[in-house]
Image (tube, rainbow, N blue to C red):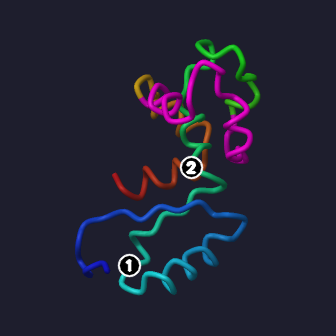
Amino acid sequence: MSIPGSDYIFTSDADGLTIAQKTERIKAHYPYCECQKIHIVQREIESWYLAGINIEKYPSIKRRKALNTDNTSKEDFRALIPRRYSRITFMIELLEQYNLRLAKERNISLTQFVNSVL
């Protein structure tokens, strides 16, 4: 249970729903969650990871896939993971060299999220 007025950010993948629909579902499941603290990722959170990477470092990632990540799915992301990495290890490495400025240029929902929380 969440306490109104407490500090938190609730994020969720859209899962094929509109932002309004997903927010309603979250509110139904977590009635104490405040709407202004809910942030929906269009399409999936993996798109945010991919948006901020240096594509020269990962030759398996096609330039066009990284230039606009708004429609990147979990499956798209998994297909880009080099064989030598587990999913989690790859995600951690991406965060270690993450470029937020670049990521905001490549993903609309990340830009909206950053602008609303900063």
Which residue is located at x 23 percent, y 72 percent?
6
Q: Is residue 72 left or right of residue 25?
A: right
Q: CA distance from mark 1 to mark 2?
A: 21 Å
- x and y, in percent, of residue 5 in the image: 23, 77
Depth check, front residue: 82 or 95: 82
Q: Is residue 80 left or right of residue 53?
A: right
Instruction: State the image quarter where residue 96 is shown.
Output: top left
Q: Is residue 97 left or right of residue 76?
A: left
Q: Residues within 10 Å of mark 1 (few under 14, many from 20)?
A: some
Q: Is residue 115 magenta?
A: no
Asked if the residues shown at circle 1 and circle 2 are in contact, with their CB atoms under 8 angstroms apart, the answer is no
Which residue is located at x 68 percent, y 31 percent?
67
Instruction: State the image quarter where residue 4 is shown.
Output: bottom left
Which residue is located at x 62 percent, y 43 percent?
47
Name the element at disc 1: loop
Name the element at disc 2: loop
Give the residue type that dot 1 points to. Answer: Glu
Give the residue type that dot 2 points to. Answer: Ile
Q: Residues within 10 Å of mark 2 (few under 14, many from 20)?
A: many
Reading the image, the residue beneath label 2 is 45
Numbered-mark total: 2
Rendered position, 86 above or below 84 = below
Reading the image, the residue beneath label 1 is 34
Mark nearer the N terminus (1 vs 2): 1
Q: Which residues are magenta?
A: 68-95
- x and y, in percent, of residue 33 in the image: 38, 78
Q: Is residue 86 magenta?
A: yes
Which residue is located at x 31 percent, y 80 percent?
1
